Amino acid sequence: MNGLKGISKKKLLDMYRMLTKIRGVQLMIEKLYHLDEMKTPVHLCLGQEAVSVGVCANLKREDFLFSNHRGHGHYLAKGGNLNFMIAELYCKETGCSKGRGGSMHLIDTSVGLMGSSSIVSGGIPLAVGAALTTLLKRENRISVVFFGDGASEEGVLYESMNFAALKKLPVIFICENNFYSVCSHISAREPDSKIYMRPKAFNIPSKRINGVDVLEVYLKAREAINYTRSGKGPFFIEARTYRWRGHAGQGDEQKSKYRKMDEWRRWIKLDPISKYEKRLLKSNILSEKLKQNINRQIEYDIDKAFEFGQKSPLPKKRDIMNYLYG
Ligand SMILES: Cc1ncc(C[n+]2csc(CCOP(=O)(O)OP(=O)(O)O)c2C)c(N)n1
Ligand SMILES: [Mg+2]
């Protein structure tokens, strides 16, 4: 049965579940972070959930994904294991990076997450390299990289786009433009903030999209992914979104110092989840009962994941040299 805009009911509900899951996980991390048991800096993606969900809902397990420091939503939406992600935040042996990476260095090749990098823009050339491998091996998968507006100011993006366009590589660049790099607004950093116009200099097709509307993200990402999967080369998406909290950690005590408060309030009202939820309820795709069941299940899974993370063992001292290369 068709739901909205020709998208199946199952897909619509899967996206609702994933949005709700990512939101719930972020709120729980924020709630428990002050206990100082998660020995890792955290960069919450509250407010930005629709970009991860809308893009990844179009990807296959074997597609490569590269992420950045704000990567919880990317990992979960790609099919990542919640228990393993939370254990990683507790730096436990059972974490997806065996407790060696923490929040900014998630990796799980079993679902195609080839790594998240704390080096701003660090994932971009890796995604292009992975796309080159795919092309040379004639495999049928694409490579996708998420990065921020701040990363779009790094020179490596332009080298990477040039090479990707030259070789028609199957790579999709997703820039999550949340307008801030730490505390600097984009208008204080760039003379012209039309990020999506820059790929055009390399003949890479690009689009600016509304990153708080999951249906728009899903549909526009689908177009981009179909284009790239069919062998036509790279595609670039600038998804405009907003980070609700500070750059790192809980809350945002500094927000009135570097943000305009009416800007903040306007974006909070554009909450990607409540708007989507209302739409689903109105179209009878979601009922109050189903909503409650979904939310209850997610709360249960989140509680279990935190319990798993807390109770899991730390890596052993004798294994300290494992996974080092030199
Ligand atoms: C190469 C490099 N430069 C600077 C930093 C410090 N730094 C960490 S996150 C960040 C801001 C990145 O902003 P953006 O790419 O927009 O991502 P967002 O935090 O907004 O999601 C900076 C400057 C870094 N980690 N790596
Ligand atoms: Mg940013």
Image: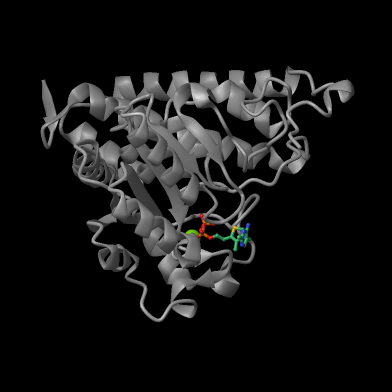
Farthest residue in the bottom direction?
191
Near-viewer residue (56 or 289):
56
Where residue 42 appears, as percent x and y from the top left, is 64, 45
Q: Is residue 267 above or below residue 113?
A: below
> Is the residue 150 above or below the residue 289 in the image?
below
Q: Is residue 178 visible?
A: no
Identify the colour scheme used: one colour
Locate residue 304 relative to residue 316 in the image: left or right: left
In the picture, which quadrant includes the C terminus?
top right
Image quarter of residue 275: top left
Horizontal and vertical percent for residue 135? 33, 36
Give the residue furthest to the front: 136
* Residue occupying image coordinates x 41% and y 63%: 158
Residue 80: tell me if it is visible: yes
Query: How far across and how far down the image is residue 90, in percent?
Result: 72, 31
Taking the image as shown, residue 37 lies to the left or right of residue 130, namely right
Q: What residue sits 10% from the left and 25% below the top? A: 2
